[in-house]
Amino acid sequence: MDILSDTLEVLRTGRPMVTRTDAHAPWALKFQPISGAGFHVVVEGHCHLLPPHGQPLALGPGDIVFLQRGSGHTLCDVPDRDPVDFVPERVDRSSPIGQVTVDGSGPHTVLVCGAYAIDVDRPHPLFSDLPEVIHLPAVPGRHPVLRSAVDQLCAEFHTPQPGSDAVVTALIDLLLLYILRSWYAELPKERTRGWAAALTDPAVAPALKAIHDDPGHPWTVESLGTRAGLSRATFARRFASVVGEPPLTYLTNWRMATAARLLHQTPTPLSTIAQRTGYTSEFAFAKAFKRHYGSPPGAYRKQAKTAGDAPGGYERRAEPVQESERCGDRDEARGGGGSGGEVTLE
């Protein structure tokens, strides 16, 4: 699996939820902060987004906005309305599709409003490099694949058919990938840095793919540097400069994120998870996981079941990982630690 797809797969903690919003002016809807990422697609009409910071953003038909941290915000027909809370109604509790209707005598606006159960509370570079709000205006001929997905999504909402729930859920998942692709594609070369640069960097990308393909392998800075065709020191500097954190820190964080997903979404035994994430003993894995997440694996799994689809995830560990540490339970056995604004594209 490619790096971006694998990252989204691991950081995803549940299925997306989506709501069709039909609003006749006057209207203003307040969206509370969520532990995930949110988006809005304007299907018909016009409205304004009032972001957490900055000026109101005017939106028209086909426009897309993506809020990478699910920040609280308001959507309204005009910016000076007093908002009411956005509360979707779900006739069928098993369906991911909700409905919000605002009655009025003014112009009609139709929105698709969604939320991704993605672990954005932990600082993975994929999300930490994104602006708080991404605006992708509807420009003819630009991002045709993204526009095609939006058109299909709108068609399912306009004329529901048997299987629409499954189609909508699949399209929402695709929309996230297409939004990120479109964002990366629009970045000028001089602004391409961090995760966007890492995905195509000739030295960093092979190392990232090696980590993602086999997180349980006993990687070292030297062996990852060999994949990149660089010396240990040169590779370490290059990786930290592009990704924003040292290679073994990224490796440890990725191992823990992988373990968290397995605990959250599968009944995989702890011994198997330990092996998949580079620990030959369940004890060493549990010790590392508790240090990273603040609770042992068993308790984390119980909490995840209680929370249902609520995002869990990729938090900052309580203690920083030192680049000199080796990854895996061999260091644990010795008593040491495991290693380990708004932007518009027009």
Image: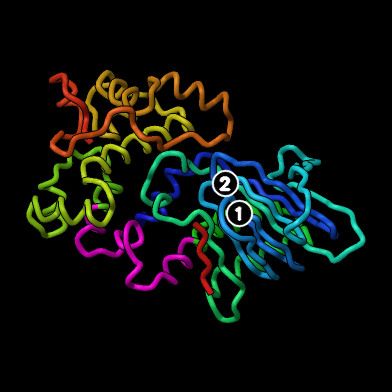
Identify the residue position indicated by label 1 in the image: 51
Circles 1 and 2, Cβ within 8 Å, touching? The answer is yes
Q: Is residue 151 above or below residue 121?
A: below
> Who comes first in sequence, dot 1 or dot 2?
1
Asked whether, in this view, residue 123 is left or right of residue 100, the answer is left
Q: Residues within 10 Å of mark 2 (few under 14, many from 20)?
A: some
Above or below, 341 relative to 87 = below
CA gap, disc 1 and disc 2? 8 Å
Going by the numbered disc 1, the residue's amino acid type is Pro
Circle 1 residues within 10 Å: few <14, some 14–19, many ≥20: some
Task: Quadrant for residue 39, please give it.
Answer: bottom right
Magenta-highlighted residues: 180-207
Dominant SS of magenta comes to helix
Q: Is residue 272 visible in the rendered structure shown here?
A: no
Q: Position of residue 194 (x, y in %)?
A: 32, 57
Instruction: Tell me the residue that label 2 is attached to.
Output: 71
**Residue 59 point in image, percent of width and height:** 67, 67
Q: Is residue 343 visible?
A: yes
Q: How is the image coloured?
A: rainbow
**Which quadrant would residue 219 be assigned to in this image?**
top left
Magenta span includes 63:
no
In the image, 172: left or right of 210? right
Which of the 4 image quadrants contains residue 66?
A: bottom right
Q: Is residue 116 above or below residue 341?
A: above
The N terminus, quarter of image: bottom left
Residue type of the residue flagged with mark 2: Ser
Residue 136 lies, in percent from the top left, at: 56, 67
On screen, residue 171 above or below 212: below
Is residue 318 toward the left or the right of residue 345 in the image? left
Residue at figure coordinates x 55%, y 75% from the top left? 144
Q: Secondary structure at mark 2?
A: loop
